[in-house]
Amino acid sequence: MKSYTDLEQSKRLANILPLESADMCFNISQRYNMPPLMTPYSKFNEFFNMEKTPDFLIPCWSLAALLKLIPSYIIQQGEVYFGILDLNECCLKYQTNDGVDLLETKYYDNYIDAAFEMVVWLKENNKL
């Protein structure tokens, strides 16, 4: 089960979202010849007593962090669309009470990818 955004997704989100919204981070330092480590991004400076976050840390987002960013409803051309998390399929969508779709993500094998797709769409369409 995918627990957080992958490195490509993380880099893209880091360019469009406030970094404080990330709840984890990749440590891509090759200094100790270790694989990427996960560390809470907002706590890194505090844990390691550093003034600023080093460049070798790439923020990433868990599903919970992504879902916090996604509004429960959006208004498009005067119509209210409510966000729906499809529990049978890994997809997110916005639709009216009458079932009219505004947007539906692709179906994935995990919710992280669906939430990533939705966050990017919302940001690109000025809904975040």
Image (tube, rainbow, N blue to C red):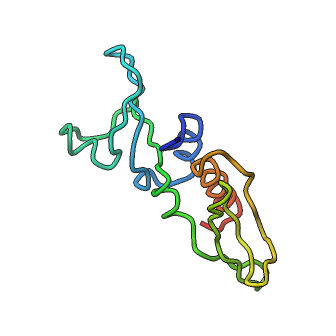
Q: In the image, what residue occupies the spot 49% across and 44% down?
A: 4
Among the 4 quarters of the image, the one containing residue 70: bottom right
Q: Position of residue 120 (x, y in %)?
A: 65, 54
Q: Position of residue 30 (x, y in %)?
A: 39, 17
Q: In the image, what residue occupies the spot 21% across and 45% down?
A: 46
Q: How many marks?
A: 0
- The residue lying toward the viewer, choosing from 17 and 9, is 9
Q: Is residue 95 above or below residue 24?
A: below
Q: Position of residue 11 (x, y in %)?
A: 55, 39
Among the 4 quarters of the image, the one containing residue 58: top left
Query: Outermost residue toward the front?
Result: 88
Q: With 119 as the anchor, is 125 left or right in this view?
A: right
Query: Outermost residue toward the right?
Result: 100
Among the 4 quarters of the image, the one containing residue 79: bottom right
Q: In the image, what residue occupies the spot 66% across and 57% down?
A: 118
Q: With 118 as the anchor, is 63 left or right in this view?
A: left
- The residue lying toward the viewer, choosing from 128 and 105, is 105
Please identify the quadrant where the C terminus is shown: bottom right
Q: Position of residue 96 (x, y in %)?
A: 74, 80
Q: Is residue 5 above or below residue 32?
A: below
Q: Is residue 24 above or below residue 89?
A: above
Q: In the image, what residue occupies the spot 40% across and 39% down?
A: 25
Query: Outermost residue toward the left?
Result: 49
